[in-house]
Image (cartoon, rainbow, N blue to C red):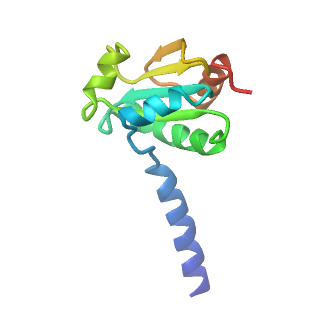
Amino acid sequence: MKLFFSVSAIFLMFAGVANAELPAATAIAVNQALSSGKPTLIDFGLRTCNVCKKMAPYLESLSNDYRERANILFIDVRSDQATAQKFRVQMLPTQIFINPQGKEVQRHTGFMDKGGIIKGLKSAGLK
């Protein structure tokens, strides 16, 4: 019985990682992040996009790891087209890195692995 619970706990732990995703940010959350004085990554994508799904665990993990030092947001363009238009997003996924002063310093389109995301955050001023 103890083995059953241990195996079940491990399965649930990995199942949670496989389905990890940040909640979709609102326009208010974007404005708060940009005025926070922290580097910010805004990832624009779709919940149904396969590339976006592959990136979701990285974004969620880094959001937790850098919570005090950076903002990491996800915008689902299907539900927030206005924010996507404001940032002139033309392809999905698009990652926009913004420095603490609110200036865009890097833009990337397509899949970005964890190392690439960290590098982008550093270019935006992550310390």
Judged from this view, the residue extending furthest toward the bottom is 1
Quadrant where the N terminus sits is: bottom right
The image position of residue 21, as x and y in percent, is: 44, 45
Quadrant where the C terminus sits is: top right
Is residue 22 placed above or below 91 in the rendered structure? below
Please give the name of the residue rendered at 39% of the width and 27% of the height, measured from the top-left corner: 44
Q: Horizontal placement of 117 versus 87: left or right?
A: right
Please give the name of the residue rendered at 25% of the width and 32% of the height, measured from the top-left corner: 78
Of the pair 17 and 104, the residue shown nearer to us: 104
Is residue 62 placed above or below 16 in the rendered structure? above
Of the pair 111 and 73, the residue shown nearer to us: 73
Is residue 92 placed above or below 26 in the rendered structure? above
Q: Horizontal placement of 90 versus 71: left or right?
A: left
The image position of residue 68, as x and y in percent, is: 66, 41
Image quarter of residue 105: top right
The image position of residue 53, as x and y in percent, is: 40, 38
Q: Horizontal placement of 80 versus 21: left or right?
A: left
Judged from this view, the residue extending furthest toward the right is 127
Q: How many marks?
A: 0
Please give the name of the residue rendered at 63% of the width and 19% of the height, measured from the top-left corner: 124
Image quarter of residue 36: top right
The image position of residue 22, as x and y in percent, is: 45, 43
Of the pair 38 and 24, the residue shown nearer to us: 38
